Image: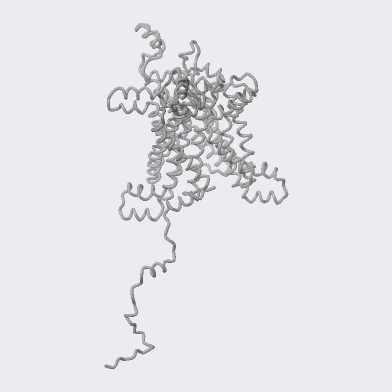
Amino acid sequence: MNEKKPNPLSFQLDVSAFVPATQEEKESLVIMRESRSFWKDGIHRLSKNIVAMVSLIVIVIVLIFAFVVPTFYPYDYKTQDKVGGNTPPMGYSTQEQAKIDAGEFVFPHFLGTDNAGRDLTVRIMMGSRISLLVGILASAIIMLIGSTYGAIAGYFGGRADQIMMRIVDMIYTVPDLIIIILLMTTLKYPLQSLADSSPAFHWINTLGVGLICIFIVFALLYWVGMARIIRSQILSLKEQEYVTAARALGSSHRRIIQKHLLKNCIGMIIVTTTLQIPSAIFTESFLSFIGLGVAAPMPSLGSLASEALSGITSFPHRLLAPAIMISIIILSFNLLGDGLRDAFDPKLKK
Amino acid sequence: MPLIKEWLTLGKYIIKRVLYAVLTLAIVISLTFFLMYLIPGGPFLAEKAPTQATLDALNAKYGLDQPVYIQFKNYVVNMFQGDLGVSLKQRGRTVAGIIGSKFPVSAKVGGLSILVALVFGIPLGTVSAYYRGKWTDKVISVFSTFGIAVPSFVMSTVLIIILSINLKLLPTYGLTSPLHYIMPVIALSFYPAAYISRLMRSSMLDVLGQDYIRTARAKGLSTFVMLFKHALRNAVLPVVTYLGPMLAYTLTGSFVVEKIFTIPGLGKEFISSITNRDYPMVMGTTIFLAALIVTMNVLVDIIYKLVDPRIKLQ
């Protein structure tokens, strides 16, 4: 057998010279970096923003104080001590002083007690809990109603859009706080009778009529801003090719709105909702301050401030503490919202 | 004839806005009436329960025995004649009379606050935009960020604690001397001033980047004239749109501030009528304030269109 020497000019290939590439070789050929998702990108940008991160930390601390600490705090928000009230910050009532003299340990009242002998520190923590709950839940309601309404109006357009947006315009022109006050003064009665009428509605009493009133009025009046923003987003998004493609593939309207349109405004929705929280807390504290809102003994930051108003000359700290707390909460949510806007919607950055 | 056409579109716009306002007010009035109607218990169920005969006579006298829609019609007709009913708690006084005597007090404090907010907010925003990124801008931004986070009742109480209790400089309650105005006006104007300075800063930044500002500079105008004569005119427009919401804020803010400083104005009256369940008073004040806010909003919108020729009328 005389093996034929290959002609150096031949184009015939030797199969044995080819082997499958190893994993490393494959990876070395990928020039692009690993793709970054929308979320990772936004969170990365957010983590670079010092102000937003500090306010996020502050919010987490406030949340811990409002929801975790009261459960194992030695005092609770409603136990009264008729004789030992009105102690100054870090002070003790006479009985407590006697216990301390006897060598027992008494947990200090960091901010003193109020005129009914209730520990002010825990009351402020509970008050922050109510304020935060109202802010977050109300914003969630607003987000649900506003984004659905705005998306439907923007997606269908035409006559439906016109009618829906006229309704929004109308609610927009209504002076909201005055109507809220009116609703709060009147809604109490039908709600109360509803709660008393059947055991199915007893939860109204446990939550408090005032609190439910707040949610109702927020759900009725405050979603319009959200609806406007989402509608204008949807109007431009629905002209994009992927929506046409989805429609050509036979997606239902519902699916297009849910999977394609709303998902693409998610950054906007998050930012608007975050900025809604402080304004809801603002409104709630205003309402509680003028005597509407949550019922005693449940404290809210606004009602705590309102209660302390009569003793302002002798116990200014009782007013200052809830006042500072409200300001901290509103400020940090505002700053976090601004940070989120810069991170998730760079186009809006001014 | 472009001019006539322009005026026609303007007229159309005004008619549309006024119609909206009327519709809104109609909704507010009917909402107020029917919500109040739903409240159980009549106005005559006081501590001493009257006999059925007296009750019937009273109901007949005030037309409360008639069907709802007739009562509603009567209420609306009376309202247009300036009659908002009688206060339940302040015997012998009409709601319209109380509003007429209390509102001027609130208007004085509120008007002053709006003025102060504009006088401070506009220059602060302008200066902040001009020194963008410098320490002046940073100081002003810190002020405006805090300003929009502090509710008016927090501001008022902090002012009282510092200025009245600790320094003993200012009186805490009443409205008898010019000194009494200082704290309520600061408390009411703090938020709007901060908000205006933010608005002003961002619109001023837009304006300062435009060509005609460069021209003004090239002509050798002083910074002051350039900022406050050339740039301000265009940059101030967003603030005009804020006038309506600012009025609403000042009116509702006055509820709290008047309560804290015991100012005998409409806001304090409104709050006490809510706690006293003086329903005709609550209804009357609600409608009065709503009408005021809605009217002002329409006026502001029309002024805005008149002032800025760049805005297209639809």
Q: In which quarter of the image is residue B179?
A: top right
Q: Is residue A271 depicted above or below B245 in this figure?
A: below
Pick out the residue farthest to the front.
A103
Q: Is residue A131 visible?
A: yes
Q: Nearer the viewer, residue A42 or B9?
A: A42
Where does the image place residue A86, in percent across and percent down from the top left? Answer: 49, 21
Image quarter for residue B191?
top right
**Total numbered labels placed on residues in the image:** 0
Q: In which quarter of the image is the N terminus of chain A?
A: bottom left
Position of B205 compared to A187: left or right?
Answer: right
Q: Nearer the viewer, residue A9 or A187?
A: A9
Residue B311, image x, y percentages: 55, 43
Residue B283: x %, y % from top left: 45, 21
The picture places residue B261, in percent across and down from the top left corner, at: 56, 22
Residue at the limit of the structure toward the bottom, as seen here: A2
In the image, A36 versus B90, the foreground residue is A36
| Color scheme of the displayed model | one colour
Q: Is residue A300 visible?
A: no
- The residue lying at 48 percent from left, 40 percent from top is A58
Left or right placement of residue B273 versus residue A255 in this view = right
Taking the spot 38% from the left edge, 68% from the top edge, the residue there is A24
